[in-house]
Image (cartoon, rainbow, N blue to C red):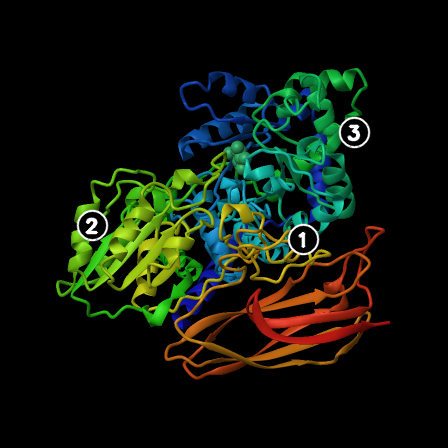
Amino acid sequence: MRTFRMFILSLFIFNLLLVIPGTARTLTDGQIENKVNELLGKMTLKEKIGQMVQYSYSGSHGSKMQEEAIRQGLVGSFLNGESIADINRLQKIAVEETRLGIPLIFGRDVIHGFRTVLPIPLGQAASWNPHLIEAGNAIAAREARANGVHWTFAPMLDICRDPRWGRIAEGLGEDPYLASQLGAAMTRGFQGNDYSAPDRLAACAKHYVAYGAAEGGRDYNTTAVSERQLREIYLPPFRAAVNAGVATIMSAFNEIDGIPASGNQFTLRTVLRDEWQFKGFVVSDWSSMTEMLNHGFCVDEKDVALKSLTAGVDMEMVSEAYIHHLENLVNEKQIASELIDESVRNILRIKFKAGLFDNPYTPEGGEKVLLTPANQNVAREIARQSLVLLKNEKHLLPLAKNLKRIAVIGPLANAPHDQLGCWVLDGHQEYTITPLKALQDYFGKETEILFAEGLKTSRTTRTDGFDQAFKYASLADAVLLFMGEEAILSGEAHSRAFLELPGAQEKLIEEIAKLNKPTVMIILAGRPLTFHQVAEKVGAIIYAWHPGTMGGPAIVDVLFGDYAPSGKLPVSFPKTVGQIPVYYAHKNTGRPPSPNQKGIPMGTPLDPVAFVSNYLDVDVMPEYPFGYGLSYVNFEYSNLKLSTDKLKMGETLEISVQVKNSGKMAADEIVQLYIRDLVASITRPVKELKGFKRITLKPGERQVVNFKLQTDDLAFYNQQMKMMAEPGKFHLWAGKSAVDGLQAEFWIVE
Ligand code: BGC
């Protein structure tokens, strides 16, 4: 651990050194504004509109029309450039063959790493480690920028409480506080202090906003959230990214309470510009503007252009409403030319800040920074910290290192493409280290690794591989089952209605379980799955998400005790799809159920057993709660102390709790702080996360962990939609998860 911290430190120092000489942006914001205005003064209306156009690069064969458009100053940006040479070629046209030489900005989806693929963002979130996430995304930035990318369409900050939604993989979980902390860290990782540096990218917080609340978990679907839910749940991570200086924002596909996100003046102007003072630019999601025709919000493409610009979308991704209609709309005085100027200013400002006017080209040789041992180390560390130990009966894990034979079974044991997860444009599967490969590398000749996948893919129902798997398992001292879902089952437009392990996986587990061998299930997946029945049949379960390039070694580190697992769930796991949405920060309701109550005893008369808010056939508790994750050691919590139990408005509450590692190895714990505001003018959730700290403790070591809460941290949007704390009684917990912890109480007094 210490070596790793030293490594991270040296990485930051190295970055600083790399940035200081000559590459740091030397212009002040005021000087940039002058340059923007000077340039704007020289631009024709057509050229201005050109800056607001983003095309998807159509490849070196079909690009003649696009090249001509650049030459005429009718394009401001591309996404999906193919190679450094390609990108430089197009850039050269913009810089050398147009009247004003304004450089293009090239965007790309660098979602969880570039060539070195990090765990999916939901997995990164399970690390609850902002510093590490910052370091990981700094690596993604370095690899991408050196290969011609100026701008990433990340971080994805959509709060999601529905694991059916395939894009839950790309986000940071269910909680606004956690996602805000981690999303800001990602933003800092991509951008550093100065994204004109040759190893940084401009970032894009997406998808603004409430995209993760899609009905039924169906991608692109309707969201009907109130302004209060927007402000309490969906907006905070975006605000945190804006506060962290995010360069751009992407407007989403969905409608929000009847108004599509790309035509939404409330979210794009009132909140983003007026309240948050956002100074970067807004790009629409891919054709999300013209999709407002399907939404039934616009009458034709011209109406699309009018409504999008009025709402505040500065750049149009792929569809062509702006290029076709903005000029006419200005000439017909339906749109004030000032609105166009404002958008172009926003775009040029970011192009200056990204250093594109000084350094428009990318030097060849970008492959040199890819997949370096240092990058792989960071990817391995994030993967290790993302692993969540869900079950460990009778301390089955860690496994002994001197086993004679280990059976490695399952469709995800050696699936180099699938363990990378969704949204991997630049990761190459030949660099993936799978669990099988890592196990073979880890053990010498003394341990035999018996590999039988059992099932060719996660979805197949063909059981002809079962016999071999059963045979190997019967010969082994321990069985490792690598189950889950393949990459294609999560991500954009890849929602699922059933969340069980797909195909014949459950059958395979049941077969192997008949042998009563020490059996560990490792699940690789893009979302929380439901596996209640089979969980009972194995001794231990590790949730590994899609862990990326270095997933194999990270899993082996944990299986054999070289690293004690420390990940905690960033999202609640349902027992069954019927419980969705299940999340920890729910309201109490007027008829709260007792947590584990379910069912009606046989022969119950028509009288109610209890008219409370629950199900007849399952209780309301999740299978695994938010914040949950076991370790190889036990952490004892004691001495929860508050500096006062009566807090005046404006004062700070100091909280301390002692945590002891009572186990036999060094391990990390993520200490979590929750509160409940018991009575307020607006009903409050039964728990809200307000702080967390990752600590490392040696065997027997204790540490006092401190938190501070100001009364502002306890504020919420009141009936007048003003952010205010109210006097009253609060509960507070410090503990291991959302359902566990020492409890205290305090009051805010007037
Ligand atoms: C996705 C975005 C992505 C964009 C560009 C869209 O389909 O929703 O997340 O950034 O494509 O690739």
Residue 556 placed where, x, y %? 30, 61
Identify the mark nearer the N-term, 3 or 1.
1
Between 717 and 162, the one lying in front of the other is 162
Residue type at tag 3? Glu
Residue picked out by circle 1: 243
Quote the CA–CA distance across marks 3 and 1: 26 Å
Between 669 and 82, the one lying in front of the other is 669
Residue 521 placed where, x, y %? 33, 57
Residue type at tag 1? Asn
Residue 142 placed where, x, y %? 45, 49
How many residues crowd mark 2 within 10 Å: few (<14), some (14–19), many (20+)? many
Dividing the image into 4 quarters, which one contains the C terminus?
bottom right
Quote the CA–CA distance across marks 2 and 1: 53 Å
Residue picked out by circle 2: 469
Instruction: Write down the quadrant of residue 325 in the picture.
Output: top right
Residue picked out by circle 3: 338
Residue 481 placed where, x, y %? 29, 54
Front of the two marks 3 and 1? 1
Mark 3 C-beta closer than 8 Å to ligand 1: no
How many residues crowd mark 3 within 10 Å: few (<14), some (14–19), many (20+)? few
Seen at 78% across and 44% down, the residue is: 274
Q: Secondary structure at mark 1?
A: helix
**Depicted 413 relative to depicted 322: above or below:** below
- Please indicate, yes or no, whether residue 39 appears anywhere in the rendered image: no
Dividing the image into 4 quarters, which one contains the N terminus?
bottom left
